[in-house]
Amino acid sequence: MTMDSFPQHADKVLSVFDFDGTLTIHDSFIPFLRFSFGRRVFSRKIARLVLPTLRCMRKKLTRDELKEVLIKTFLTDIDEQWVREKALAFCAANWTRLMRPAGLLAVAAEVNSAMEVTICSASPEMVLQPFADRLGIKLIGTQLEVVNGKLTGRITGHNCRCGQKVKRLEAVYGPLSGYHLRAWGDTRGDFELLAAAQDPHWRHFHTGWKKRRMPIEKLRMIQLDP
């Protein structure tokens, strides 16, 4: 799509990429925890997630609540600087095997077209910052609470998924109606973002058999919901 094809009222273009599964081949947060804590400590801590995960599968715990348990289990009373250093090391060690080449090309194309480009992800900002820095774009993600240089094991605000993605974007950029919004996503957590976009891309970088059809009816329901 060329700039001439954008609506005349849209003076600015905002390009928003989900991270996990969209720009990457799989989730990044669990692998980051395994990388940072080592196999033995990771295995011991992740075992505590078995019962909460079963409760989530039985709809007795939401995905957001399960994520809060995960963060509390691994990141309570952990030095912020340690996490940031591990995030840098994780990015350096896993960039090639984790990132989708087609996704990297798409991000570069948006940046080279002088678009405003950002990642908007449910993963912690602290973990993804090295990836955003390497891509040369901005980052909006789930924020971890830090007190006196240590993580408390709690989230500040809300998990950045579903409707929170739109709210977080508007908190940074203002009303999205002022932009021609281009968005890339691959899960239920991206539906509201894709519904808000004039130019939505569903599983754009996936192989053909994994793309399937965009759940357009669900997106329309979101758009019609007052």
Image (spheres, grey):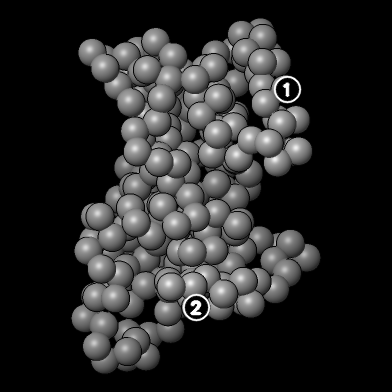
Is 128 displayed left or right of 213 in the figure?
Answer: left
Residue holding disc 2? 224
In this figure, which residue is indicated by the disc labeled 1? Answer: 50
Q: Is residue 68 above or below residue 122?
A: above
Q: Residue at x 48, y 50 (%)?
A: 161
Amino acid tagged 1 = Val
Q: In terms of secondary structure, where does tag 1 sit? A: helix
Q: Residues within 10 Å of mark 2 (few under 14, many from 20)?
A: few
Q: Total marks drawn?
A: 2
Residue 219 point in image, percent of width and height: 56, 73
- Residue 113 percent coordinates (x, y): 31, 71
In x, y percent, where is residue 42?
62, 14
Q: Which mark is residue 135?
A: none
Q: Is residue 11 above or below residue 209?
A: below
Viewer-nearest of discs 2 and 1: 2
**Mark 2 vs mark 1: which is more N-terminal?**
1
- From the viewer's perspective, is 157 left or right of 206? left
Q: Quadrant of the C terminus?
A: bottom left
